[in-house]
Every structure is written in C-alpha cells, then in structure tokens.
C-alpha cells in the first residue's frame, strides 16, 4: 500500500470513529453534528495529526483518537461561529442554525466540545491536555476580537494576524504538535512541529480569505463573498483599502457596512480589490509562510510521512478550494 492510500485508510478509520462518537440517543446531537460533518470539509486537522504521529511512530490506536478529537472540536467551533455570524450556509449547504435554530446549535456545539475534551483527557497525557486547553481559550479570544472589529475598515494587518492565528492557526499547530508530544520527540522537534503548524495554518487561512472572493461556488463548496456579507475585514480587503483612491475606499466601506447580497456591488468590490493588488499580495504572503514552514521540516526523522508533509506544504498556497 502506498503512503497516500495508507493515510486515506487512516482518515476513513477516523471518520468512522467520529460517526460513532456523534451517534447519540438524543436525536438533535446526532442530526446536527453529523449534518455538519457529512457536509464535507478538508479534514486538514486529522490529516496533520496522522502525519505528525506517524513521523514520530505513534501507534494508530492513539492518533486515531486525537485526530477525531481535533475534528470534533473544530466542528463544535463551526457550529458556534455560524450562530455568531448568523450564517445561512456552511460548505454549500444550509447551516445547522438555519435548520435547527441557534439554541440547538449552541448546545450541540457544547456537547461536541465536551466530547473532544473527554477524548484528550482519557489519553492521560498532561502535555496534550495543556495544549488543548490553551487552544480552546485562544480560539474564543480570536472570535471575540473578530466580533469587536467586524466591519471596521481601520482593522490593521496586526489585528488581522492576531485573529487568524487564534481562530485557525493555533488549532492546526496543535494538530501538528500532538504527534510529537505522543511520540516523545525531542524538545527541538516538538518546537519545529508547533511552529510549522502555526505557519502553515496562517498560510491556509490566507488562501481561504482569497478563495472567498475569487473561487467559484462549485469549486470551493461555499457561497462567494460570504466574508463581505458578514463584514469580515480580511487581508485582501485591508490591502485594497490601503491602496484604493477616495472613491474606491468609499465603495468598499459601503459594501462592508451592508449585509445584503448585492451581486452588482460584489462585482465592483472584486474589481477594486483586484486592481489594488489585494489578492496578489495575500497569495504572496501565503507563499512566504508556507516556504518558512517547509524549511522547519529539515532535520526531522526521514520517512515517507515526512515527504508527504513536504508535498502537502508545497500545495497550500496553490489551493483553489
């Protein structure tokens, strides 16, 4: 079996475990959690847990549980995020809060947080538990900062990076570091995996923020321009605002202040952002973070899994979906 098929088999095992953990006697828990899990997603966090664990020779029975915990935790945060954002769709399908309501979505999200925490605690690994608790707090902080700065055209690149690190990159970093913790890697190796995950997480989110504007709905699996409708000021918008003339800046401000899905307005915003190098700048930044992440893999134990991680890293900034 080649490495890709082997990793695919592991992901199938993780998916089966997730389905088992989210099957419950309370119908709402099963329906809501499996609705979101079945709607797609890249499974990037389980994938990275599997690779990092196999690099450090962690038994499959251990990394399967942690990979599932990471994805269940991520799913919980999506349920909560959609309530905060009043989102109507997630991955091209109606959001859970739109179908079942905010109260049920929040409560099922809480149940999933408890489930993922229980899995981590059962591992009886203080390093893993401390890491998970730290990320839990950071993600909540990131959501609060983003909420406070929603629709604020004064949002700086520094604020933006704070938000995406806390909301996205630290969990991806934890996925990468978890394998080195369970495998009892050296402190240097553990630090490399932690920093690698943070950098690749930033690069991943940068490309996601471009995709929100430039990718087709069919390809990306989500509606185009969701960030604009929700008033999220992302890096492509920050760059465009800094380069735009007075008239263009006024239009961008108007678009961010409105939550209406105006296709004509979106097209105008897109042209302004493209003209003022928002997408180009963001992609170059993503490439820079991915290249820095790639260099951190030097010196780690050589294996097919490490080569697979290198290949993955080289594709992050080229994603279209």
Image (cartoon, grey):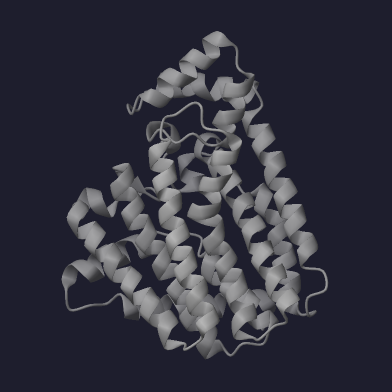
Residue appearing at x 59%, y 84% in the figure = 182
Compared with 4, 40 (above or below) is above
Q: Is residue 5 visible?
A: no
Residue appearing at x 51%, y 90% in the figure = 61
| Residue 86 falls left or right of residue 149 | left
Q: Where is residue 185 in the image (x, y as percent from the top left)?
A: 70, 83
Q: Where is residue 88 in the image (x, y as percent from the top left)?
A: 29, 43
Q: Position of residue 211 (x, y in %)?
A: 55, 41
190 and 54: which one is in front? 190
Compared with 180, 205 (above or below) is above
Q: Position of residue 20 (x, y in %)?
A: 33, 81
Check the image and name the residue furthest to the top.
247
Residue appearing at x 23%, y 69% in the figure = 29
Q: Name the image quarter holding the N terminus.
A: bottom right
Residue appearing at x 52%, y 78% in the figure = 128
The image quarter containing residue 198 is: bottom right
Q: Is residue 149 visible?
A: yes
Compared with 276, 11 (above or below) is below
């Amino acid at each position: 079996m080649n490495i890709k098929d082997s990793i695919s088999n592991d992901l199938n095992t993780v998916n089966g475990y997730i389905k088992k953990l989210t099957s419950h006697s309370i119908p709402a828990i099963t329906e809501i959690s499996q609705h979101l899990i079945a709607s797609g997603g890249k499974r990037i966090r389980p994938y990275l847990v599997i690779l990092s664990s196999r690099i450090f020779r962690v038994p499959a029975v251990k990394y399967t549980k942690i990979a599932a915990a990471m994805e269940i935790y991520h799913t919980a945060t999506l349920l909560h995020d959609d309530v905060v954002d009043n989102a109507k769709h997630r991955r091209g399908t109606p959001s859970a809060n739109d179908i079942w309501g905010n109260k049920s979505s929040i409560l099922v999200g809480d149940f999933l947080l408890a489930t993922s925490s229980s899995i981590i605690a059962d591992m009886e690994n203080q390093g893993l538990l401390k890491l998970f608790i730290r990320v839990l707090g950071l993600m909540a902080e990131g959501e609060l900062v983003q909420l406070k700065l929603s629709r604020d055209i004064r949002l700086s690149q520094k604020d933006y990076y704070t938000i995406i690190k806390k909301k996205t990159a630290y969990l991806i970093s934890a996925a990468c570091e978890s394998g080195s913790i369970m495998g009892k890697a050296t402190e240097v190796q553990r630090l490399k995996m932690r920093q690698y995950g943070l950098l690749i997480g930033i690069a991943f989110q940068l490309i996601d923020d471009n995709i929100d504007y430039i990718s087709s709905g069919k390809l990306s699996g989500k509606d185009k321009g969701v960030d604009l409708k929700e008033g999220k000021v992302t890096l492509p918008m920050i760059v465009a605002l800094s380069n735009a003339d007075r008239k263009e800046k006024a239009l961008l401000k108007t678009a961010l202040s409105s939550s209406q899905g105006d296709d004509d307005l979106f097209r105008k915003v897109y042209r302004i952002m493209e003209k003022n190098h928002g997408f180009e700048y963001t992609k170059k930044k993503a490439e820079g973070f991915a290249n820095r992440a790639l260099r951190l893999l030097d010196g780690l134990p050589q294996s097919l899994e490490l080569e697979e991680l290198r290949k993955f890293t080289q594709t992050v900034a080229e994603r279209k979906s």
